[in-house]
Image (tube, rainbow, N blue to C red):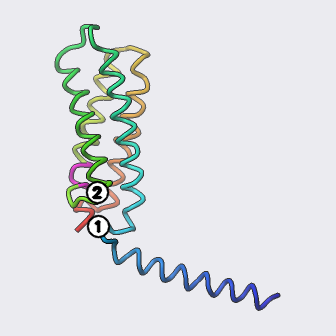
């Protein structure tokens, strides 16, 4: 029984070592697997944020929100959708866009908070989560392109 556990342990170590070596070599899209988890998380958060912002935008229609507020929310939606798409496809521009997306999310959260409307809480929260995820993606990539 002891030899069985040692065999399983040895095979696990071989598997882990092989997986790490493969992960560091990159995949067919060029994304280094070390950053793949950050990109997947960020893409998910970007999609959630875009959805929350679309609901906020719909809510604000006809409520007298300024054109600047509406455009800030639209910018956030556009950047979140584009950022998620680039990350999903493994684009070499994904990390660069993540920095812009984080900035757009922070601005959107601020303009929505300034509205002092409880119906915008989900948008504010999701923008803050997305901004953090995008910032983490940029940090994980060392500020460089993620997918060279």
Quick one: which residue is furthest to the bottom in this view?
Answer: 3
- Give me the residue at 40% from left, 54% from top: 40
Residue 22 highlighted magenta (yes or no): no
Q: Main secondary structure of the magenta part?
A: helix
Q: Which mark is residue 20?
A: none
The image quadrant of residue 90 is: bottom left
The image quadrant of residue 125 is: top left
Q: Nearer the viewer, residue 105 or 93?
A: 93
- Give me the residue at 42% from left, 59% from top: 37
Residue 96 highlighted magenta (yes or no): yes
Q: Secondary structure at mark 2?
A: helix
Separation (CA) of disc 2 from disc 1: 7 Å
Left or right: 50, with 104 as reference point:
right
- Give me the residue at 35% from left, 42% from top: 46
Where does residue 86 sit, x and y in percent of width and height?
26, 52
> Which residues fall within the magenta stretch?
94-98
Residue corresponding to mark 1: 29
Q: Which quarter shows the C terminus?
A: bottom left
Q: Which mark is residue 89?
A: 2
Q: Which quarter shows the N terminus?
A: bottom right
- Give me the residue at 37% from left, 44% from top: 132
**CB of mark 2 within 8 Å of CB of mark 1?**
yes
């Amino acid at each position: 029984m002891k030899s069985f556990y040692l065999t399983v342990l040895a095979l696990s170590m071989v598997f882990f070592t092989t997986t790490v070596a493969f992960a560091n070599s990159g995949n067919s899209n060029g994304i280094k697997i070390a950053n793949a988890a950050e990109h997947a998380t960020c893409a998910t958060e970007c999609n959630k944020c875009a959805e929350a912002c679309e609901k906020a935008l719909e809510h604000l229609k006809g409520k007298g929100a300024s054109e600047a507020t509406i455009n800030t929310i639209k910018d956030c939606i556009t950047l979140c959708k584009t950022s998620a798409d680039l990350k999903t496809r493994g684009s070499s521009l994904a990390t660069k866009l993540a920095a812009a997306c984080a900035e757009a999310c922070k601005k959107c959260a601020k303009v929505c908070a300034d509205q002092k409307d409880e119906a915008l809480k989900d948008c504010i929260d999701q923008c803050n989560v997305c901004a953090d995820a995008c910032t983490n993606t940029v940090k994980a990539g060392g500020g460089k392109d993620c997918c060279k």
